[in-house]
Image: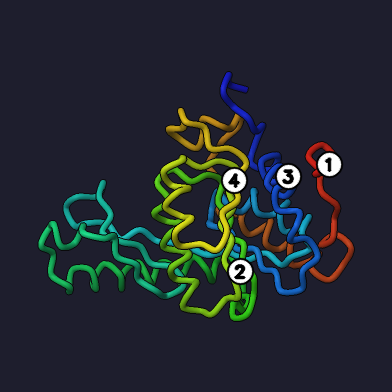
Amino acid sequence: MSGRALFRDREEAGHWLAAELAGYAGRGDLLVLALPRGGVPVAFPVAQALGAPLDVLVVRRLGVPGHPERAMGAIAAGTVVVEPGVAASLQLPDRVLEREADRERAELERRERAYREGRPPHAVAGKTVIVVDDGIATGASVRAAVVALRTLGPAGIVVAAPVASPRALEALEQVADHVVCVTTPAWFRAVGELYGDFPQTSDEEVKALLRASGASAGGEAAHTALHPAFAAP
């Protein structure tokens, strides 16, 4: 583990995060939505500890044509969220954003179908939704997810991550009802710096965790106690 790493891996980070979210445990209106792929292995122990169902919320970045390093927005839950000022500053016509959104919408729907393997998505309306990622650097994807979720009528939206930059955390507090984070180091630069083991999460791992979560949803495994090493005092 590197000198600054706080979490051994995403699973351990999920147990830490579950302890921070312990106040939500056992609520009947709770839904945990993970941002794939890296957010899923963090969200799995969170959902298990809180006794909540787990699903994915795919967010797709809308890149500026010819400038792949820049994002003009994102799409999640069928809603397009435009980055303030980007499209206008580049003088991009609306059809450019629409064309990019149509392409990414198709990919978003394909990925959601693949991850769920035929299972229907969980209803969001009236639920308290906890949106989980493995870390938040800029917050753009998570912000898009929150804005999109608002259109589906949840009772409340909680953003949760093991680590976030102070700037991203401040921005997310403006759009979410509650933001929960284990650590926000001032020196934060990249999510992987806080993890000893931070490999790419595979599509197969995402699908396996969603299957495992669904299989335990009605049984005792869905109400597993918080990991003993990180249980709240």
N-terminal of the two: label 1 or label 4?
Answer: 4
**What whole-number distance in Å separates the C-alpha atoms at marks 1 and 4?**
18 Å
Q: Which mark is residue 114?
A: none
Query: Which amino acid does the dot numbered 3 rest on?
Result: His
* Sequence-earlier tag: 3 or 2: 3
Tag 4, which secondary structure? strand
Q: Is residue 202 above or below residue 47?
A: above
Q: Amino acid at mark 2?
A: Arg
Helix, strand or loop under label 2: helix
**Image disc number at residue 15:** 3
If the image is split into quadrants, where does the C terminus sit?
top right
Pick the residue in front: 170 or 41: 170
Q: CA distance from mark 3 to mark 1?
A: 14 Å
Does residue 115 sit above or below 150 in this rendering? above
Q: Earlier in the sequence, mark 2 or mark 4?
A: 2
Give the Cα separation between the discs numbered 3 and 4. Answer: 12 Å
Q: Residue 188 placed where, x, y %? A: 46, 32
Q: Position of residue 120 (x, y in %)?
A: 62, 78
Q: Residues within 10 Å of mark 1 (few under 14, many from 20)?
A: few
Say whether disc 3 or disc 4 marks the residue closer to the N-terminus. Answer: 3
Dot in front, 3 or 2: 3
Residue at left 19%, top 57%?
A: 65
Q: Which residue is mark 4?
A: 181
Judging from the image, what secondary structure is the residue with disc 3 in? helix
Q: Which residue is mark 2?
A: 116
Q: Amino acid at mark 1?
A: Pro
Q: In the rendered image, which residue does mark 1 sit on?
A: 233
Q: Disc 3 vs disc 1: which is toward the camera?
A: 1
